[in-house]
Image (spheres, rainbow, N blue to C red):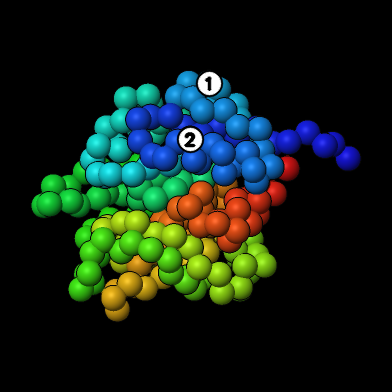
């Protein structure tokens, strides 16, 4: 049995808690490189797409390094991608902030919009409702994860054609408003929360994801 650790690229496109993401993925058992180089990221066993701040700014930074094409190329070849926070949001069709609509990567239909809760942003620890057969949340039970966001995907629009496996969608609730907390869809995985800020639970989740790379 090989003891070689999976090679993971944390994508550097000018957004996200890059160093904390690198450290967290390293601690979870991968060899990690922080880069925006297209070919290096394409060849890695796994790609992490972080993201913080405005949807439009993240998409502009991603497109500047052809990151949208990179994600599409990897997924076409069944190569795993993990989006985190706004790095999850940009995987959907579009985002709307302050009345401005921005096109996303369109890997999933759906719109990122402002949460309809009494207190926004949603900041702090929260539980999630994961499907029973989730690999990402395997062994995590009712653990809590750390969220910092004002926008999210509040309805799931994906319709399968009967030939593909339906994505596993994990939900969370803030102030009575339900939103997508994570998605597992073949090689494409994403979380609205920050695993790298979620202590032992986040570390276990990252280990689960890295376990899918081998």
Q: Residues within 10 Å of mark 2 (few under 14, many from 20)?
A: few
Q: Quadrant of residue 134?
A: bottom right
Horizontal placement of 182 versus 213: left or right? left
Image position of 62 with respect to 178: above or below:
above
Give how far across and how far down residue 187 sits, in percent.
57, 47
Q: Residues within 10 Å of mark 1 (few under 14, many from 20)?
A: few
Q: Residue at x 67, y 67 (%)?
A: 139
Q: Quadrant of residue 27?
A: top right
* In this rendering, the label closer to the viewer, 1 or 2: 2
Q: Which mark is residue 39?
A: 1
Horizontal placement of 11 versus 176: left or right? right
Q: Which mark is residue 19?
A: 2
Quarter that holds the N terminus: top right
Q: Can the viewer see residue 174?
A: yes
The furthest residue to the bottom: 176
Q: Residue at x 31, y 56 (%)?
A: 149
Image position of 106 with respect to 47: above or below:
below
Q: Residue at x 58, y 61 (%)?
A: 201
Q: Residue at x 35, y 30 (%)?
A: 14
Horizontal placement of 77 versus 17: left or right? right
Q: Can the viewer see residue 106?
A: no
Secondary structure found at label 2: helix
Give how far across and how far down residue 193 sits, in percent.
43, 57
The furthest residue to the right: 1
Secondary structure found at label 1: helix
Q: Earlier in the sequence, mark 1 or mark 2?
A: 2
């Amino acid at each position: 049995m090989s003891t070689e650790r999976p090679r993971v690229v944390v994508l550097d496109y000018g957004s996200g808690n890059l160093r904390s993401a690198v450290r967290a993925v390293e601690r979870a058992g991968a060899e990690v490189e922080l880069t925006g180089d297209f070919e290096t990221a394409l060849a890695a066993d796994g790609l992490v797409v972080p993201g913080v701040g405005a949807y439009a700014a993240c998409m502009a930074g991603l497109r500047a390094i052809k990151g949208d094409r990179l994600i599409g190329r990897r997924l076409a070849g069944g190569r795993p991608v993990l989006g985190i926070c706004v790095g999850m949001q940009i995987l959907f069709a579009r985002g709307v902030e302050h009345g401005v609509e921005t096109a996303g990567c369109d890997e999933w239909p759906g719109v990122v919009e402002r949460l309809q809760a009494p207190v926004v942003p949603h900041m702090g620890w929260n539980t999630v409702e994961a499907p029973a057969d989730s690999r990402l949340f395997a062994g995590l039970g009712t653990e809590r994860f750390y969220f910092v966001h004002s926008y999210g995907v509040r309805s799931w629009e994906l319709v399968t054609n009967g030939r593909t496996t339906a994505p596993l969608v994990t939900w969370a609730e803030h102030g009575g408003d339900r939103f997508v907390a994570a998605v597992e869809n073949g090689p494409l995985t994403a979380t609205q929360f920050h695993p790298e800020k979620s202590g032992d639970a986040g570390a276990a989740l990252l280990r689960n994801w890295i376990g899918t790379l081998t």
